[in-house]
Image (tube, helix red, strand yellow):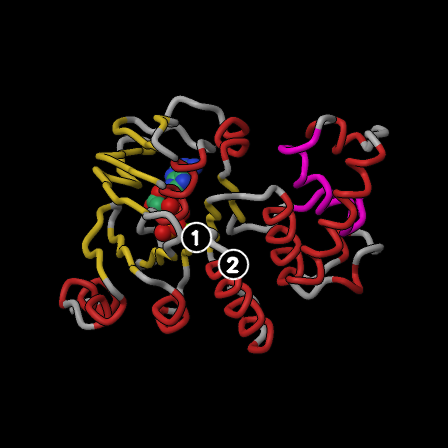
Amino acid sequence: MLNVSGVSRSFGGVYAVRDVSLSVADGEVCGVIGPNGAGKSTLFNLITGHLAADHGRISFLGQRVDRLAPHRRARMGMSIVFQAARVFRGMTVEENVMVGAHGHTRAGFAAAALRLPRHQADEREIAAEAADALARVGLAEWADRPADLLPIGQQRALQLARALCARPRLLLLDEPASGLRAEERERLATLVEELRAAGLTILLIEHDVGFVTRLADRVVVLDLGRVIADGPPAEIRSDPAVLAAYLGQ
Ligand code: ADP
Ligand code: MG
């Protein structure tokens, strides 16, 4: 589904991501872990096109995408939930989620963001989809409230609902569990399992190694911008290079 090959990106001469290669198979949940500043978020932004790579190739669904704008990659089926919550102010929770459906309707993103009238059938379908996505992330009762009044954990849940409304093939989640309470983390873990069962391919950045190794089929470990380990969770947990990166041994 996704192939990243020799991808690098530097900021002011310092590599954030350095010669990274990885592949993600259709239907796989792939965890991405590593210490703070390892390059995890940068890697996600390179995959989705929110940052341009200095070197390397990225293919998605068999097509080279590393020169495509983010919205083109989104239309092909990539959806990202950023590490920092991003909600549209002045819109309700439900309206925020409905914006996510822009990629597969006639009217498109601009019309959704401007709240222009849309085709009625589209409108009904999107509203139903939004309600379903909000229920899945536990935000059903917040639908009519202003999005910017949500606590930070719920803002991230809202982004996830919006991402699901875009009907992705590949979902990239950047530390979706951070700032969540225990029961919210459990809900998120269950949702990831449901989405995997429904055939979605997921890339999941997570700080809590226990959380990610429980959900992931495979874990990629980054340190100082490089891949230092890539394998099944059980192998990763006992990998000496991983232990050294985390524990400074
Ligand atoms: P992680 O998500 O693993 O914590 P990041 O990808 O956010 O790491 O950052 C990797 C490195 O790149 C860090 O040293 C960070 O300071 C640097 N970096 C990330 N984004 C930028 C940017 N826009 N400008 C300058 N440096 C950046
Ligand atoms: Mg990050």
Q: Viewer-proximal residue, 104 or 41?
A: 104
In the image, taking residue 184 as reference, residue 230 lies left or right, namely: left
**Circle 2 crowding by C-alpha within 10 Å: few under 14, some 14–19, many from 20:** some
Based on the displayed image, in which of its 4 quarters is residue 122 positioned? top right
Residue 38 % position (x, y): 31, 51
Q: Viewer-proximal residue, 20 or 231?
A: 231
Q: Residue at x 79, y 30 (%)?
A: 114
Is residue 183 one of those drawn in magenta? no
Residue 23 % position (x, y): 28, 44
Q: Which residues are magenta?
A: 87-105
Q: Is residue 243 above or below residue 126?
A: below
Q: Is residue 108 above or below residue 143?
A: above
Is residue 99 one of those drawn in magenta? yes
Q: Kindly identify the amino acid type of the residue bearing the numbered disc 2.
A: Leu
User: How would you classify the magenta stretch by its main secondary structure?
Assistant: helix
Tell me the quadrant of the picture where the N terminus can be found.
Answer: top left
**Circle 1 crowding by C-alpha within 10 Å: few under 14, some 14–19, many from 20:** many
In the image, taking residue 119 as reference, residue 207 lies left or right, namely: left
Front position among marks 1 and 2: 2
CB under 8 Å between callouts 1 and 2?
Answer: yes
Secondary structure, mark 1, is strand
Q: Residue at x 51, y 26 (%)?
A: 72
Secondary structure, mark 2, is helix
Disc 2: which residue = 195
Disc 1: which residue = 202
Q: Is residue 125 above or below residue 76?
A: below
- N-term mark: 1 or 2: 2
Residue 83 % position (x, y): 51, 51
Residue 228 % position (x, y): 19, 54
Q: Residue at x 58, y 74 (%)?
A: 181
Residue furthest to the top in view is 67
